[in-house]
Image: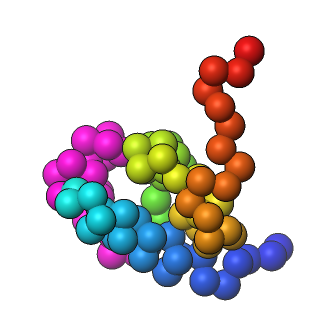
């Protein structure tokens, strides 16, 4: 099975960067992800992030999951307009 070798550090660094840029506290991150503060702290220290929380982070900061995991550098690449029918 192929494993992107820097995925863990890339997504952690990008979540931390987004938090810093937006002055998001760990308590606010807990509300965004619907995780406890303790669970958010564990995620920020390297524990695997649950998929639902990961997607919530991407949606909240208006970035793509591809950006968070390091597949693209453009934060808005491949955005789909929500108003599509």
Residue 38 visible in the snapshot: no
Residue 17 location, x and y as percent? 36, 71
Identify the coloring. Answer: rainbow
Q: Does 32 sit left or right of 1 as displayed? A: left
**Magenta residues, start to end:** 25-46
Residue 46 location, x and y as percent? 40, 75
Give residue 70's quadrant in the image: bottom right
Q: Does 26 sit left or right of 52 as displayed? A: left
Residue 71 falls inside the magenta stretch: no
Q: Does 19 sit left or right of 49 as displayed? A: left
Quadrant in which the C terminus is drawn: top right
Please determine whether, in this image, residue 60 is positioned above or below residue 54: above
Residue 41 location, x and y as percent? 25, 65
Give residue 13's quadrant in the image: bottom left
Q: Chief secondary structure of the magenta span?
A: helix
Please determine whether, in this image, residue 1 is positioned above or below residue 84: below
Which residue is nearer to you in this view: 72 or 11? 72
Residue 45 location, x and y as percent? 33, 75
Please determine whether, in this image, residue 62 is positioned above or below residue 39: above
């Amino acid at each position: 099975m192929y494993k992107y070798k820097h995925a863990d550090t890339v997504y952690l660094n990008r979540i931390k960067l987004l938090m810093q840029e937006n002055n998001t506290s760990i308590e606010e991150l807990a509300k965004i992800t619907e995780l406890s503060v303790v669970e958010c702290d564990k995620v920020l220290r390297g524990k695997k992030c649950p998929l639902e929380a990961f997607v919530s982070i991407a949606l909240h900061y208006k970035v793509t999951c591809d950006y968070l995991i390091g597949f693209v550098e453009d934060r808005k690449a491949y955005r789909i307009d929500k108003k599509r029918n």
